[in-house]
């Protein structure tokens, strides 16, 4: 009976680890989208800042 219990316990642990990896993946994807959004929002900012500087120089 003991080895069976160990197998069941390992199965439970595996299920838990799977859930953890899934949550980590979703967190990563959220971070990725946030980073991408930040990058895309920064792009127009630099575009608007550059012409202002050139206008000041002129």
Image (cartoon, rainbow, N blue to C red):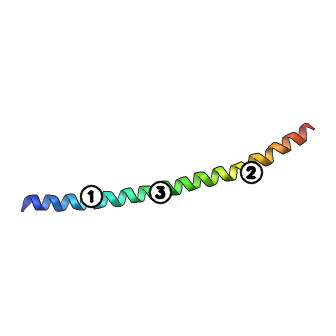
**Which element carries disc 2, helix, strand or loop?**
helix
Q: Residues within 10 Å of mark 1 (few under 14, many from 20)?
A: few
> Quick one: label 1 or label 2, which is nearer the N terminus?
1
Instruction: Identify the residue shown where x is 48% and y is 54%.
Output: 28
Question: How far is the residue under mark 1 from the one under mark 3?
Answer: 20 Å
> According to the image, label 3 marks what residue?
27
Q: Earlier in the sequence, mark 1 or mark 3?
A: 1
Q: CA distance from mark 1 to mark 2?
A: 46 Å
Residue pushed farthest right? 58
Q: Quadrant of residue 2?
A: bottom left
What residue is shown at x 60% (from left), y 52% (from top)?
Answer: 36
Q: Name the quadrant of the C terminus.
A: top right
**Does residue 24 appear to the left or right of 6 in the view shown?**
right
The residue to which callout 1 is attached is 14
Query: Where is 38 relative to 9, above or below?
Result: above
The residue pinned by badge 2 equals 44
Disc 3 to disc 2: CB gap under 8 Å = no
Callout 1: SS: helix
Dot 2 surroundings within 10 Å: few (below 14), some, or many (20 or more)? few
Number of other residues with Cα within 10 Å of mark 3, as a class: few under 14, some 14 to 19, many 20 or more: few
Rendered location of residue 46, percent (x, y): 75, 45
Q: In this rendering, is residue 28 above or below 8?
A: above
- Answer with left or right where residue 10 lies relative to residue 19: left
Quadrant in which the N terminus appears: bottom left
Q: Measured from the top left, where is residue 40 in percent x and y?
A: 67, 52
Q: Compared to 51, does 23 lie above or below?
A: below
40 lies left or right of 34: right
Which is closer to the viewer, label 3 or label 2? Answer: 2
Which residue is located at x 58 percent, y 55 percent? 34
Q: Is 16 on the left-hand or right-hand side of 11?
A: right
Give the x, y percent position of residue 49.
80, 45
Where does residue 54 sit, x and y in percent of width and height?
Answer: 87, 40
């Amino acid at each position: 009976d003991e080895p069976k219990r160990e197998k069941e316990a390992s199965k439970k642990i595996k299920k838990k680890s799977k859930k953890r990896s899934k949550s980590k993946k979703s967190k990563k994807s959220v971070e990725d989208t946030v980073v991408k959004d930040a990058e895309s929002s920064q792009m127009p900012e630099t575009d608007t800042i550059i012409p202002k500087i050139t206008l000041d120089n002129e």
